[in-house]
Amino acid sequence: KCAHMHTSAIYQQLKKSLNSYIEQGNTAFTVALSGGVDSVVLLHLMRTLKVDNPAINVSAIYVHHGLSQYADDWQHFCKNVCIELNVPFEAAKVVIEQQSRTSLEAQARDVRYKALDELSPQGSIILLGQHLNGQVETFLLRLKRGSGLKGLGSMYKERLLQSGRICFRPLLNVARSDIEAFATQFSVSHITDDSNTDESFDRNFLRSKIVPVLAERFNGFEQCTARSIELLPHQTQTHPT
């Protein structure tokens, strides 16, 4: 299976996006593994990259939020995937103390980054499975909140944690449909998060009801929005106020 993955377009894209790190001597990568299709495909791609380049070290971490009744099952699934691919695996159990002024999603994210940072091997770059569609959803959520230029353009490929550790999103230009097609083609088993279909969450509402309509009406909508997001940090106000 690994041999065929070498020829896939997603693999070539991943290889290209990690190239500058590897050329600078960064050879350790840690996949933030949730068990969902995005992160499991990312793990398979990184395993293929390691076959290509044995100097690379790949590990994976599952962060157990306890937010879902299935979290134990997901952790077990992730561990088994890592055993199958011969990738070192760690799990972190974290507790989220709900604060009134911060969204649960934001708190879960902060706790997750902290756990990933603490558990990843020293010098390892953390890889996140976020993709093109997730970027568009984030943009629309921030538009709804009235974010400025910085907020609207802030889902970057690279993010530095307070510790100085690099988090990188190598699939940010890849559409969800392409990731799902890859999983089908190479029989990559993954789990489906039950909360992803709950439309009381704004992100899921955008994902299932709004973005597909826009993409159907306007050809290339997601790619064009992603291009605008990438341009935003580089645009400066040139006209007088």
Image (cartoon, grey):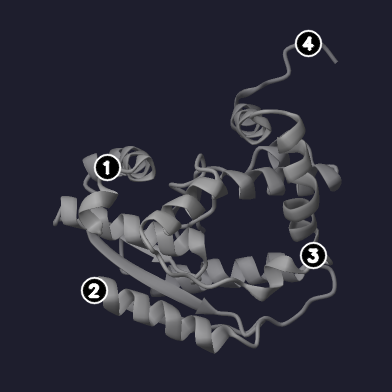
Residue at which label 3 appears: 201
Of pointers 3 and 2, the one earlier in the residue sequence: 2
What label does residue 239 carry, if any?
4
Quick check: 188 left or right of 219?
left
Residue 185 found in image quarter: bottom left
Q: Secondary structure at mark 1?
A: loop
Residue position for label 2: 86
SS at mark 4 in the image: loop
Label 4, label 1: how far apart the Cα atoms are: 47 Å
At label 3, counting other C-alpha atoms closer than 10 Å, the crowd grade (few under 14, some 14-19, many 20 or more) is few
- The x and y percentages for residue 202 are 80, 59
134 lies above or below 109: above
First-in-chain label (3 vs 1): 1
Q: Nearer the viewer, residue 133 or 167?
A: 133
Spatial CA distance of label 2 from label 4 is 56 Å
Viewer-side label of 2, 4: 2
Q: Which amino acid type is marked by label 4? A: His
Location of mark 1 (residue): 7
Residue at image location 79% in from the left, 64% down from the top: 201
Between disc 3 and disc 4, the foreground one is 3
Q: Nearer the viewer, mark 1 or mark 2?
A: 1
Verify CB contact (< 8 Å) between mark 3 and mark 2: no
Provide residue 173's location: percent of width, then percent of height: 51, 39
Cα distance between the residues tagged 1 and 2:
22 Å
- Work out whether residue 145 or residue 200 is closer to the camera in this orientation and state it: 200
Identity of the amino acid at label 1? Answer: Thr
Q: Are marks 1 and 2 in contact (CB under 8 Å)?
A: no
For the point 62% across and 46% down, the residue is 133
